[in-house]
Image (spheres, helix red, strand yellow):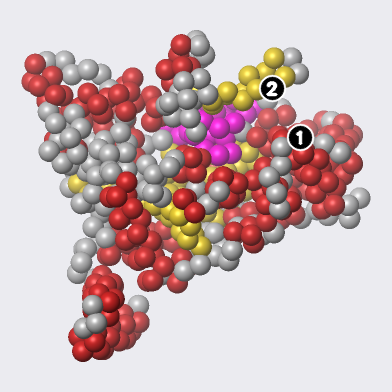
């Protein structure tokens, strides 16, 4: 698959499928790994990083058919292309920004991806739509085992997998679930979720992870610590907490529909109306309105719009994708025009 | 992303400044954010809190340890304190006494109980990878007889792996 295909397709994680997909957008697990006989990324010379990239890269392409097609060196990509990968959650913002030798490999369906030479030599990721952490763990565990047979990972008898930052040491795992929580935001109950999560040592973050805002009422719940518990325990912990949040959001949805039926319907229909008629749409406003349409579809207020369509619009209207779709670099104001035009076209068939 | 103010350090504080109708994205490094008096609460990642978390070593032995340089990557603990990142896997052993309480503080535990890497180099797959590397080298160096032999070995090894997997 070429990068140009990214202007028309979405990864498996945005298919809107899987258990509880009316609220759980995606499940993600990442593992941080480092090669034993090399300095960490921040201390390694460019030549050393290049050697690491080339060794891991050729192993993946030659020995694992899943990564044969999607392999990109950051140096070969322009800024828009790098940001396409960020918007698709295949790489981090830091990975896109840095100039040192680095790369990313991904499976065709974008379920599996590997950042090479991010903060750690390897950042393995599995990303699935819906609530599917157990399945996701199976996949990434297998990939990790496979790689550990080919490469000697930095591993300490007492502290486990060694990472550049001691916050990731041990299992190197981060487990996160992305949730759409518009009703909890509307009813101002979301703060309670934050407080409850921090009490049990879980973090709540925005759409693009650390330090980002929760655009479109999307929140990620993830573990804070990576050492002292088995991977399965860390996953279980998140799995046991998420149903409570889902139930809370469902209750809030019911509540707003029961107590303010007409106002809620009006609000959601207006959001669709804006998207269908607006001539200028910023990325933030689009996410905000799409959040209402997503909620409307899930609550059967506007049942005919599939969540896969909403997700597709959500991804393809983000700045880098939009510029890829349009085929040229756009100034922010031009983007808002193109975005509005694209959204109008996509939604024209829905009443 | 670089800090918008000093344009030198990595921006780690990201916020949206809202004044009336105007919204402005602000991306600063920790120093510049502090100088501007921006509140850091909830805006800084756990990793970036590290620098503050890592207290200066207290007693004499500890300060001696802090000045130790890792023979592998040349980093000392003071440098680690300022960056929050180690330079190589060996640092964990070099600074063991200082790292142990730090890990305990971050994770509330100091012993890994999760998975361990599968035996490296023993597996058939690693063997296969090594063979393919040898083959490539043999062809490049025009050692064709050897290359043919390696090709046979690869075929055997592949049959074996596909049979066991």
Q: Which one is in front, A320 or A158?
A: A320
Q: Which one is in front, B139 or A83?
A: B139
Q: State yes or no: discs 2 and 1 in contact (Cβ < 8 Å).
A: no
> Label 2 marks which chain's residue?
B
Q: Position of residue A50 (x, y in %)?
A: 33, 53
Q: Residues within 10 Å of mark 2 (few under 14, many from 20)?
A: few
Residue sticking out furthest to the front: B142
Instruction: Check the image and report above or below for A266 versus A74.
Output: above
Instruction: Check the image and report above or below for B1 versus A242.
Output: above
Q: Residue at x 48, y 30 (%)?
A: B2
Q: Position of residue A48 (x, y in %)?
A: 28, 50
Q: Which one is in front, A162 or A187?
A: A162
Q: Position of residue B120 (x, y in %)?
A: 21, 63
Please give the range of residues in magenta. A189-213
Residue A119 in view in this figure: yes
- In the image, is residue A202 part of the stretch drawn in magenta? yes
Name the residue that disc number 2 marks: B23
Q: Which one is in front, A188 or A105?
A: A105
Q: Residue at x 48, y 40 (%)?
A: A97
> Label 1 marks which chain's residue?
A
Both marks 2 and 1 on one chain:
no
Name the residue that disc number 1 marks: A333
Q: Quadrant of the N terminus of chain A?
A: bottom right
Q: Residue at x 48, y 17 (%)?
A: B33
Mark 2 or 1: the one toward you: 1
Q: Position of residue B29 (x, y in %)?
A: 45, 23
Residue B43 in view in this figure: no
Q: Quadrant of residue B19?
A: top right
Instruction: Give the CA separation, mark 2 to mark 1.
Output: 15 Å
**In the rendered view, does A306 fall on the left or right side of B130?**
right
């Amino acid at each position: 698959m070429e990068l140009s295909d990214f202007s028309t397709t979405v990864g498996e994680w945005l298919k809107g499928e899987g258990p509880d997909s009316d609220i759980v957008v995606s499940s993600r697990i990442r593992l941080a790994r480092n090669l034993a006989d090399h300095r960490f990324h921040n201390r390694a010379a460019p030549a050393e990083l290049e050697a690491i990239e080339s060794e891991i890269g050729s192993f993946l392409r030659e020995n694992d058919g899943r990564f044969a097609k999607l392999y990109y060196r950051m140096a070969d990509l322009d800024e828009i292309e790098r940001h396409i990968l960020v918007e698709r959650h295949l790489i981090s913002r830091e990975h896109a920004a840095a100039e040192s030798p680095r790369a990313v490999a991904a499976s065709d369906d974008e379920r599996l991806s590997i950042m090479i030479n991010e903060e750690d030599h390897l950042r393995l990721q599995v990303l699935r739509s819906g609530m599917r952490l157990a399945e996701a763990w199976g996949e990434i565990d297998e990939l990790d085992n496979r790689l550990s047979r080919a490469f000697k990972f930095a591993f300490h008898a007492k502290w486990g997998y060694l990472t550049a930052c001691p916050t990731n040491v041990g299992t190197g795992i981060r487990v996160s679930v992305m949730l759409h929580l518009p009703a909890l935001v509307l009813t101002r109950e979301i703060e309670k979720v934050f407080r409850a999560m921090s009490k049990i040592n879980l973090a709540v973050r925005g759409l693009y992870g650390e330090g980002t805002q929760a655009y479109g009422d999307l929140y990620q719940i993830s573990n804070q610590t990576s050492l002292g518990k088995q991977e399965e325990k860390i996953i279980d912990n998140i799995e046991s907490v998420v149903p409570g949040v889902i139930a809370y959001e469902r209750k809030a949805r019911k509540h707003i529909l029961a107590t303010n039926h007409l106002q809620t319907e009006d609000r959601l229909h207006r959001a669709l109306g804006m998207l269908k008629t607006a001539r200028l749409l910023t990325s933030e406003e689009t996410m905000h309105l799409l959040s209402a349409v997503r909620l409307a579809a899930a609550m059967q207020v506007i049942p005919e719009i599939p969540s896969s369509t909403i997700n597709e619009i959500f991804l393809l209207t983000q700045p880098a994708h939009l510029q890829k779709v349009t085929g040229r670099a756009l100034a922010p104001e031009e983007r808002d025009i193109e975005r509005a035009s694209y959204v109008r076209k996509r939604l024209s068939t829905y009443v | 992303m670089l800090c918008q103010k000093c344009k030198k350090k990595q921006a780690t504080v990201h916020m949206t400044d809202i004044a009336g109708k105007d919204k402005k994205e602000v991306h600063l490094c920790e120093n510049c954010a502090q100088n501007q008096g921006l509140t850091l609460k909830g805006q800084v990642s756990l990793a970036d809190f590290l620098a503050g978390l890592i207290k200066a070593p207290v007693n004499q032995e500890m300060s001696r340890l802090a000045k130790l340089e890792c023979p592998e990557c040349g980093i000392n603990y003071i440098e680690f304190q300022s960056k929050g990142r180690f330079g190589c896997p060996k640092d964990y052993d070099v600074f063991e006494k200082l790292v142990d309480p730090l890990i305990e503080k971050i994770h509330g535990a100091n012993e890994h109980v999760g998975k361990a890497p599968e035996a490296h180099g023993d597996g058939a797959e690693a063997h296969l990878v090594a063979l393919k590397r040898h083959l490539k080298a043999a062809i490049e160096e025009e050692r064709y007889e050897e290359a043919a032999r390696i090709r046979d070995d690869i075929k055997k090894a592949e049959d074996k792996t596909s049979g066991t997997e």
